[in-house]
Image (tube, helix red, strand yellow):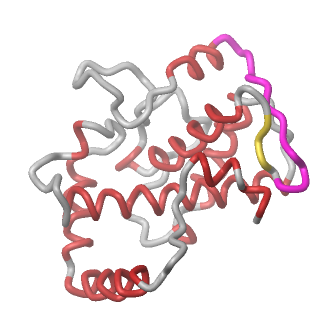
Amino acid sequence: MSSDAPSGDLPPSQGADDIHTSTRKKGRSGTRLRELVATRNADHRLPIHFDMQTCKPLGENSTKFISYVALLGRSKASILCDDWDHVPENVKNQIWQSILVTYDVPNTNLLRTKWISYVGERWKNFKTMLTSHYIYGSKTDKNPCEKYQFLDEETWQAFKLKRLDPVFQAKRRVAQEIAKKNVHPHILSRGVMRNWSRR
C-alpha cells in the first residue's frame, strides 16, 4: 500500500501511485513529486493560498499543488470506472485527505467540491490520453505501465478491451466528429488553471 494513501481501501488496480522512487525506469515517469512525500513524512504541510471566490490557488506552491492534485486523480481512481460519477466516494475522500495532509488547505465544502471536480477532469483526460496514444495512436507498441507505475498489467489489459469494444469505438467516432466542430477545444493544462478565474 502506498504511503500516499490515507486510511481506507484503494481500487486494487491502482493502489500505488508513482510518487515513490522506482528502479524500473529512470526519467519523468508520469510526474514525480518526491519532495512532497518527504515534506509530508516530516509532518509539515506546504502553505497554499486560494482566491476564495474562484478557488484558484495562489503563491509559489500553486503550480506544484495543481500537479500533485492531478497526479492523485491519475493514480488513485481506477481507469476501469466508466466515468467520474462511478468512482467510489471513499476514493474521492482519500484523494481529498491526501491533499489536506500534504498542503495547508482549508477544509471547506467549496474547495473540496471545486478540486475534486478538477481531479475528475484530469482523470478523464488521462484516460483519453491513454486511449488516443497507446491504443489508437503512435504508441501502440509501448506499454504505459512502464511510464505510469501506478498502472498494473491486468488493469491495462482490461482497459484496452473496454476501449476496443465496438460500442466504445462508435461513441469515440461520434465524439471525434463533435470535437472537429469545436473551434475552442477545452484543453486541461496549467495555463487553463491559471485562467480559471475567468470561468
Where residue 68 sits: x, y (%)?
58, 36
Nearer to me, 138 or 101: 138
- Residue 98 located left or right of residue 73: right
Where residue 5 sits: x, y (%)?
55, 35
Q: Which secondary structure type mostly characterizes the magenta part of the structure?
A: loop
- Compared with residue 79, is residue 162 higher up or lower down, i.e. above or below? below
Nearer to me, 34 or 60: 60
Residue found at the very far right of the displayed protein: 53
Q: Is residue 14 magenta?
A: no
Q: Which residues are magenta?
A: 42-54
- Compared with residue 105, is residue 87 higher up or lower down, i.e. above or below? below
The picture quadrant where one finds residue 148 is top left
Which residue is pictured at 19% across the width and 66% down the height?
A: 136
- Residue 61 located left or right of residue 187: right
Which residue is pictured at 35% across the width and 58% down the height?
A: 129
Q: Is residue 51 magenta?
A: yes
- Compared with residue 120, is residue 58 higher up or lower down, i.e. above or below? above
Q: Quadrant of the N terminus?
A: top left
Which residue is pictured at 52% across the width and 49% down the height?
A: 73
How many numbered markers are drawn? 0
